[in-house]
Amino acid sequence: MAAFSTKTVSKHDDYMTPKSAWENIKHFIPKKKIWEAFYGDGKSGEYLKELGFDVIAEDIDFFENNKGEIVVSNPPFSLAPKILSKLVELDKPFILIMPSSKINTQYMRKIFSNNKDKIQVIIPPKRIQFNKLVNGETPKDFKQSCNFDCFYYCWKMNLPNDIVWLE
Ligand SMILES: C[S@@+](CC[C@H](N)C(=O)[O-])C[C@H]1O[C@@H](n2cnc3c(N)ncnc32)[C@H](O)[C@@H]1O
């Protein structure tokens, strides 16, 4: 089977997570079987493993698979409505890094406003600086100056508060 990452759907989807973004929230990630469902360059899954988690990270199509007990990932932002609907349909708890602007979308409202399990957010202490890939590589002139903020969107994670501000 061809590797999934060869089929990137949008130029806005290849933002790779730095290890610090997972270190920020390691105490909120349960010691369960984690599915890093959007493989990217593979490093995110490796970082989670280095932090001591039991991680499934495979270069496969999310929509054709169902692995692990919870999804912890940074997904392709352009597919957020489809991904969120699918995770709720699977009843799969998740922590997803996505732009903070997603909270205002109609699809978030539709999926979560009446869901018995509320969406909760963790707000990082400072803007996450992703590594951008173009055709699988970091552009030579790439500077880490991400121009959007993200939340960790959590569902069925039983956070102590609906909004957690990280120090
Ligand atoms: C924002 S990047 C993040 C990658 C990685 N999760 C990380 O945190 O570094 C999202 C990745 O999802 C991949 N992707 C897009 N559609 C996918 C799908 N249907 N199944 C699995 N991966 C997909 C893209 O190729 C992209 O590399």
Image (cartoon, helix red, strand yellow):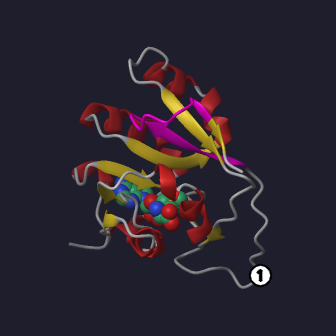
Q: What type is the residue that disc 1 sits on? A: Asp
In terms of image quadrants, where is residue 82?
top left
Q: Nearer the viewer, residue 135 or 44?
A: 44
The single residue placed furthest to the top in the displayed view is: 114
Indicate whether 44 appears above or below 76: below
Indicate whether 157 appears above or below 73: above
Indicate the quadrant containing the N terminus: top left, top right, bottom left or bottom right.
bottom left
Q: Ligand 1: which quarter? A: bottom left
Indicate whether 9 appears above or below 58: above
Q: Residue at x 25, y 54 (%)?
A: 68
In terms of image quadrants, where is residue 158?
top left
Q: Position of residue 52 (x, y in %)?
A: 39, 70
Q: Position of residue 131 (x, y in %)?
A: 63, 71
Give yes or no for residue 100 being in the magenta stretch: no
Q: Residue at x 75, y 71 (%)?
A: 144
Quick check: 43 left or right of 106? left
Q: Residue at x 68, y 80 (%)?
A: 139
Q: Which residues are magenta?
A: 149-163
Q: Nearer the viewer, residue 43 or 138?
A: 43
Residue 56, visible in the rendered structure: no
Q: Residue at x 33, y 32 (%)?
A: 88
Q: Position of residue 130 (x, y in %)?
A: 65, 65
Give yes or no for residue 152 being in the magenta stretch: yes
Residue 39, visible in the rendered structure: yes
